[in-house]
Every structure is written in structure tokens, then in C-alpha cells.
Image (tube, rainbow, N blue to C red):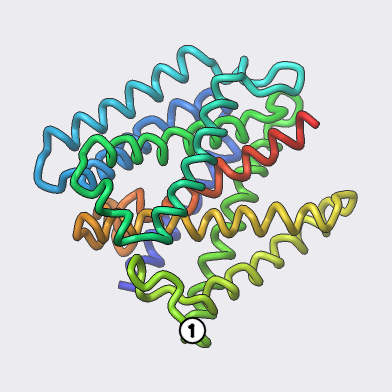
Amino acid sequence: MLKQRIITALCLIPVVMGGIFLLPANYFAWALVPIFMIAAKEWGRLIDSKCNITQWTFTFTIAAILVALNIIVPVDSLWFNSRLHPIYEAIIATGVLWWGASTLLVFTYPNSGKLWQKSSLFKSMFGQLTLIPCFTALIALKSVNDQVDPYFGGSLVFLVMLVVWATDTGAYFAGKSFGKHKLMPNVSPAKTIEGLLGGLLTTMVVVAGVMYLSPEQELGLVIAVTLVTAVASAFGDLSESMFKRSANIKDSGNILPGHGGILDRIDSLTAALPVFAFIYVAMWMS
């Protein structure tokens, strides 16, 4: 299992890095559509694990929305006078509100599950609120300052990924070494409070890297944004765990040997990206 995970990761890293830094933003936006279609198909299993019609309906609904976004709001018109297109602003803000609501659902699960776990409509809506803001946040960050510095937006996306990876890695090792107090036992029994704190502490390595490469940044602000993004990523992970537990599914898919599905790999990013993008847009406009 570990060997498979390592091999898959080694194969994925060059592809992900190439997409983030080498693909122009407009190609990047279209390349994401099939990836999010796979994630949508996996979410369809969370809606109804036995009904292929439901799964494919949700998949093509997400695909249609993403294609429409790429056509209606082309990447080269996303930013104008340092202002993000209002459609993208609204979707990202909606995503942040969703993650606030999702966090409440996680805290109150399994009682909260009584409200939605038998409703395909609710679970479909939750899937849209999870995937579409993540897509728009990715495109928004990737396209920042694209005409002047084509690597700047990729660096922002990579920064969010580093925060998520640092949080996950720190949480894993801290949880293994010191974990005693369960974080959300009804949602994910293996996660501990010590693990979460260890993950947050590990993100300070990312802060140190940012301050080293860009010392003009305000340290307190960098720490605050990093911690908020890290906490969001942790609850993104917990949210998917909650939906998988409700659907009695261990992994969202099996397309990535040793890792599960696309959703299993981007669950933390689905929350971290909209939250980081929302903060960045707010700071950019201030």
C-alpha cells in the first residue's frame, strides 16, 4: 500500500507541477474540466452509490456548469483593474459560506445527518458547493497577474498546496506520535486534536519559506492567513469523511492506486482554495 502511494505520488507530482506552472491559464482552466468531472462522478457515489443514472446526471451537471463558466467568463477577462469578475467573486464567497455551514454539519454529525443523508437533492447541492467554488478559486488564483508574470498565479496555487501538504503531513506524524484525544470521533475516528495541532505547527515551515523569499510581507498576516487556510483544509478533509461515512464508502474512487479517488486527494483543497482565494481577493481590493 505504501509503495503504491509513493509510486503514484511520484507520477502525479510532475504532472501537477507542470500544469500549475507551465500551462497558460486559459488552457489550465479547460484542463481542469475532465479532472473535476471525475471528482463529480465520485461525488455521485456519495449521493447514491447504487444508481449510475444519478451519478452520471451529477457528473454532467458539473461539467456543463464548468464549461459554461469557461465560455461566459474567459480567463483573460477574469481580472480587470485589480478586480476579480463579479461572477467568480460571488461563487468563491458562496464557497466560503458553504464551508462555514459544512463545518457546523461536521461538528453536529450524526444528528445533522438526519437532515440531509436521505436527500439526493441536498447531497447534490453540497457537491456543487464543494466542487464549483474550488474550480473557480483555482482559476482565479492561477490567472492573477498572468499577463505580467505567468508564474505568479501558479506560485499562489502551489502555496495553498504546500499549506495543505504541511497540515496533512504534520497531522499524520503528530497524531501517530502523540494522539490521544479524538478530534471528531463520529466523523473520522483516526484524527486527533494533537494531530491537528501538529499539522498547524508544521505549516509554520511554509510561513518561514514565504518570509525568506518575500521578507517584505507582514509576518503576522502571513501566519494568520496560513493558519486559517490550514484549518479550512482540515475541515475539508473531515467534511468528505462525513459524507463517505454516511454513504458507507471507504474511498471515493480507485483511479489513483494507493490513494483512492480524485476526491480523496483534493478534499482538503476544496475548502482551502476558496478560503485562501477569498482572503487574497479581499486583500487585493483593499
How crowded is the residue under tag 1: few (<14 C-alpha within 10 Å), some, or many (20+)?
many
Toward which corner of the image does residue 154 lie, by quadrant?
top right
**Residue 20 higher or lower than 163, as above or below:** above
The residue lying at 64 percent from left, 50 percent from top is: 159
Quadrant housing the C terminus: top right
Residue 109, can we see it? yes
Does residue 147 sit above or below 276 in this rendering?
A: above
Q: Position of residue 213 (x, y in %)?
A: 81, 54
Q: Which residue is mark 1?
A: 179
Residue 153 position, x and y percent, is 66, 36
Amino acid bearing label 1: Gly
**Looking at the image, which residue is at 25% across and 53% down?**
114
Q: Position of residue 216 (x, y in %)?
A: 90, 49
Q: Quadrant of the N terminus?
A: bottom left
Instruction: Tell me where residue 141 appears, x and y as whole percent.
Output: 62, 35
Q: Regarding mark 1 in the picture, which secondary structure is present there?
A: loop
Q: Residue furthest top?
A: 72
From what the image shows, is residue 211 above or below residue 175?
A: above
Horizontally, residue 237 falls left or right of residue 253, namely right
Q: Residue at x 76, y 17 (%)?
A: 81
Residue at screen point 34% across, 39% down: 127
